[in-house]
Image (cartoon, rainbow, N blue to C red):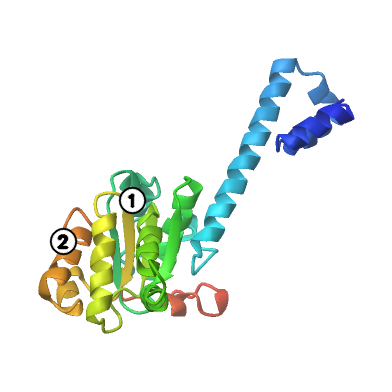
Amino acid sequence: MLNEETKRKLRLLNLASIIDIIEQQDSDVQTVALPFDQRFQRIVDFVFQEKYDDKVQRLIKSAHLRFANADMHDIYYSPKRRINRDVMNELATCMYIRENKNIILQGYTSSGKTYLGCALGKEACRQHYRTRYIRLPDLLDDVKEKATEVYGREKLLKKFSSYDVLIIDEWLMAELKKDDVAFLFELSERRFDRVSTIFCTLYKREEWIPRLGKGTFAESIYERYAAHDAIIIDTGEMNMREVFKNGTLRETR
């Protein structure tokens, strides 16, 4: 049993969880009978798991995922849906992040693009990658808001270029102004070949350049994000809101 002075020192070291697990062990006759090294191993396993879980929850919270309950294990697969289970399982390993590859989730409205993006984002958090979800309109609103501040634009570029995984939803839905495209170009330059970006969009990549207004910036954004080993996931035409209407699975015909 730990004395109060030892408990105090553990709390100062931010290791109060060791106190909890030792007290649990002391109340279990079978555990108390174990050799010291086995008990110590269980203590380390318990503290490691707790610290790991805490970090993951912090990363998930700071990611601001649109669907906080999205999960790779809950993805709906059906012959009617153009989602390959093997491809998604491979993406769940997060190898694409280590290889600095981008993912394009393209498909019709309500085909589940945002959910898939959030599920990928949560899996990245579980593997301790700094992740952030944001809608493109919200990102560009932030740019306009910070434009009047000293170094405001630069701070935003630094912030959004630093994430290991950046999920941009509603990509290219709205008409973009020249300043918007210039910002997106600079962001693509800073993220290219360093980190991964996930796009949720209605538009196939061959439609990107016209949507970006053509020109040098548009072509450069396309080249950095979509033309270099980008992973394309076609989410198809199936309306997932209808499939899960009222929170229950409804197989459509």
Determine the residue positioned at 22% across, 79% down: 178
Residue 223, which numbered label? 2
Place of residue 201 in the rendered image (x, y in percent of width and height, measured from the top left)? 30, 72
Dot 2 amino acid type: Glu
22 sits to left or right of 37: right
Determine the residue positioned at 34% across, 48% down: 97
Mark 1 vs 2, N-terminal side? 1
Q: Secondary structure at mark 1?
A: helix
Real-space Cα distance between discs 1 and 2? 27 Å
Residue 223 is at least partly visible in this image: yes
Dot 1 amino acid type: Asp
Q: Specify the farthest residue to the front.
A: 150
Residue 86, which numbered label? 1
Picture layout, residue 211 above or below residue 217: below
Picture layout, residue 242 above or below residue 18: below
Picture layout, residue 143 above or below residue 1: below
Kindly indicate the quadrant of the structure image that contains residue 85: bottom left
Name the quarter where the N terminus is drawn.
Answer: top right
Place of residue 170 in the rendered image (x, y in percent of width and height, measured from the top left)? 35, 75
108 sits to left or right of 2: left
Residue 235 is at least partly visible in this image: no
Name the quarter where the C terminus is drawn.
Answer: bottom left
